[in-house]
Amino acid sequence: MYDPTVARLTYRALLGRRRALILFSLPVLLIVIAAAVRGFSGADDQVAADVLGGFALATMVPLIGVIAGTGAIGPEIDDGSVVYLLSKPVKRPTIIVTKLIVAIAVTMAFSAIPTFIAGMILNGNGQQVAIAYTVAALVASIAYAALFLLLGTVSRHAVVFGLVYALVWETLFGSLVEGARTLSVQQWSLAVAERVARGDLVTSDVGLPVAVALLTGVTVLATWYAGQKLRSLTLAGEE
Amino acid sequence: MSSLNIDHVSRWFGNVVAVNDVTMTIGPGVTGLLGPNGAGKSTLINMMGGFLAPSTGTVTLDGRPIWRNEKIYQEIGIVPEREAMYDFLTGREFVVANAELHGLGAKAAGRALATVEMEYAQDRKISTYSKGMRQRVKMGSALVHDPSVLLLDEPFNGMDPRQRMHLMDLLRRMGGDGRTVLFSSHILEEVEQLASHIEVIVAGRHAASGDFRRIRRLMTDRPHRYLVRSSDDRALAAALIADPSTAGIEVDLAEGALLVQAVDFGRFTRLLPRVAKEHDIRLLTVSPSDESLESVFSYLVAA
């Protein structure tokens, strides 16, 4: 289920273009914000949780997920170079699973590591806040990568849809409408983080068993469906 | 020895029919898929390459379906028309990656690069390649697993004459080895120079099939239209219509010319100067008025 050649091509495509710039700039922004907050208001557990929850988990992780998830396959389908992968006796689900693993790894690297660093800067991991949000970022990375990889496989406008989901649904809708919050990767990952953090600095609207079930279900389903779509991917002619 | 079977295949996109009930068999040797732009050549090649499902009918390789059957690529090599490849790789890295995806290694890749004579530039990034070099590296990636079937969509587009000759030699060699080589083109001369067998597609239909002599004859035997100006158009018209090689004549007053429709090309070309001489008429203009490839093709469809 893993092909090292597909993985190598995907890594190089992801980290070699303009996408890499955004991948690097968001984490840098987070760390700069963390340093500024710490400088102005000193170490405060509640502030640390607010910054990590409000910016890192709610905005940065989904954005990195969009870039890595759609970028792992979308551009290849758009420009047609995916032909070189598809004209090989390699199982389609293997291609998808490999690309998913790469997308997860990239999302984790560019979201969880800076989240941890920012947490350490903000309050030195007081009340386990840094660890809790790092775990949330790791968990969310898996689901986001799978969702946005599927989006990249089925739509030519994957980045736009991905941004709408990440910013409108997760950030705006999720904070306004009660129901929307239960159907949000962010809330599911918070449910996991809740267990890690001390006190009630980290809370989620979703119970842990439901969250884990939904995270697993979404990841598996999205990956399976992306594999099916790739099996019957149609490359229309130029005419 | 492999053969591709296309059996009553149609493909439509919405309510546009791109390929209309085509049946053909592509066997070993070089076959040219000839047709004007937009005739459905790419659609047909995409179906043969497994990148498009036929709406009806079947496309098979030695009896095995091609659509949704990735194992088939052990025997098929594909050279797509689109330019996009992994531009951030070097030519060698690209061909090696293609070899690895076939379960082969650097040795197979090296052999393919030698076959397409790209060793000299193999360590340069693909983004720096010319169109002809890209085409050759694409060829190399398609040959890496020594396939018995090779599909090429408009491979000569944008190539200079030297590169074209080189690729023709290579394809001829492949065909000579007993491989099934199919390439598409909208240029008759290209197909004539290379293909031992020609399939003509016009407006989604299979218009003709055979060796190039047969196709040539079909094309020259069709009714030809000529625009003729002379010192006495009406006298010339009267004399020409008496001969069975002329099907119709129109006196175009605005143009000050005759529009002649000839059915027997050979006979008409001998008749016209003789008649003019006999009646002491001077021919001022004789020009074929419908020599475009499209009109040649549309005649073939009706035939």
Image (tube, coloured by chain):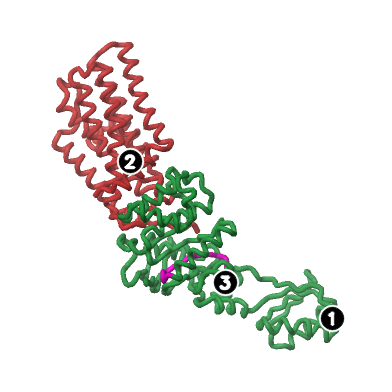
Chain colours: A red, B green
Height in image: B296 above or below A11? below
* Residue in the image at 34% along x and 48% along y: A153
Q: CA distance from mark 2 to mark 1?
A: 78 Å
Measured from the top left, where is residue B181 in percent x and y? 44, 67
Of labels 1 and 3, earlier in sequence is 1
Disc 2: which residue: A69
Q: CA distance from mark 1 to mark 3?
A: 34 Å
* Residue in the image at 35% along x and 20% along y: A32
- Whether residue A223 is visible, yes or no, is yes
Disc 1: which residue: B281
In the image, the segment drawn in magenta is B177-187
Disc 3: which residue: B297
Do discs 1 and 3 share a chain? Answer: yes
Do discs 2 and 1 share a chain? Answer: no
Left or right, residue A126 beside residue B75: left
Q: Quadrant of residue A27?
A: top left
Do discs 2 and 3 share a chain? Answer: no
- The residue carrying pointer 1 sits among few (fewer than 14), some (14 to 19) or many (20 or more) residues within 10 Å by Cα, namely some
The subunit carrying tag 2 is: A
Height in image: B38 above or below A116? below
- Whether residue B303 is visible, yes or no, is no
